[in-house]
Amino acid sequence: MELRLLVTFEKVATVLSFTRAAAELAYAQSSVTSQIRALESSLGTELFDRLGGHIRLTEAGERLLPYARQIIELTEEARAAVTAAEEPTGSLVVGTMESLTSYRLPPLLELFHHRYPRVRLALRTTIGDETRQALRQGTYDLGFLMEEETEHPGLESEVLAIEPLALVAGQPLDVACTADLVQQSLLATEPGCAYRDLFERELKSVSPSVEFMEFGTIEATKRAAAAGLGIALLPEVTVAAELAEGTLVRLPWEPPFTLRTQLAWRTGKRLPAHARLFLDQARKLVAEQG
């Protein structure tokens, strides 16, 4: 089995599209098709079921995929070891989220840009289930999660920090318990964000008919809260500046759940040197930020 055929197979198996795989590999679609046929011919079995305009892995394809990924990862690791590059090199696709990209990661991105220019970082903004699925499929190399749970099927993860949350509004309000909150206008980011979903679950334990005024971004949610449109629960790091300036007020309610910022990768994936470097630097950065 030629390595280039396995690389093409792994890409098609990940994105389940010959067209998209061709674009990402910078091949003509006919080249991708011929390479898959060559691999199938050498193995004596079909690796994909062609269903009209869609494809899916056959049982043989499912069995081959983890071996293909291991071979590709070992090859990259061997190449790095033999060449003994003086500086880290390689590409890294990282799943992240607005709260981290905008408020925690800039120093890390600046570090890699200036100190490790041969590491090509690509950030993909997704949350929750989307990030976990992309990691399992191999679309992402690493992914940041902000979750209550720390065990994720098919993934390994490292907890970087407890992520404090703050309930904020544009002015002080008398909200001592959850029952007080449901009497207020509630602001939130989109569903699927862990802290929003947990907040909603807590509120609905008191009032099942709770509804939120939804905003697409953290910035929009903060502006709405500052304008007096309601209250919002957000990661403390995202509202630290507004709390210091006094444009937002922290309300005296503490959530009965805990979020943990984590960095995750597919179970069994051998992290190359530049991915381990990213993990180490992310660990150090979050520790310094407290």
Image: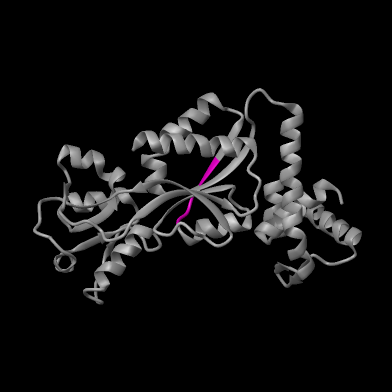
Instruction: Count the labels in the image.
Output: 0
| Secondary structure that dominates the magenta span | strand
> At which x and y percent is residue 227?
16, 51
Evaluate whether residue 26 shows in this view: no
- Residue 57, image x, y percentages: 73, 67
Identity of the residue furthest to the top in this view: 86
The quadrant of the image that shows the C terminus is: top left
- Residue at the spot x=57%, y=45% of the render? 93
Magenta highlight on residue 123: yes
Location of residue 224 with respect to 40 vertically, above or below: above
Q: Quadrant of residue 271?
A: top right
Left or right: 160 with respect to 154? left
Q: Quadrant of residue 66?
A: bottom right
In the figure, residue 18 lies in which quadrant?
bottom right
Q: Residue at x 60, y 53 (%)?
A: 266
Q: Is residue 281 visible?
A: yes
| Residue at image location 47% in from the left, 38% down from the top | 282
Which residue occupies the foreground of this view, 91 or 54?
91
Query: What residue sits 24% from the left and 38% below the top?
Result: 241
With respect to residue 51, does 264 lie above or below? above
The colour style of the image is: one colour
Q: 17 above or below 179?
A: above
Q: Is residue 70 above or below residue 45?
A: above
Describe residue 165's horizontal placement relative to residue 249 as left or right: right
What segment carries the magenta color? Answer: 122-127
Camera-side residue: 138 or 264? 264
Residue 181 place in picture, x, y as percent: 17, 64
Q: Position of residue 39 (x, y in %)?
A: 85, 57
Using the image as rendered, state which of residue 174 and residue 19 is in the foreground. Answer: 174
Q: Is residue 7 magenta?
A: no
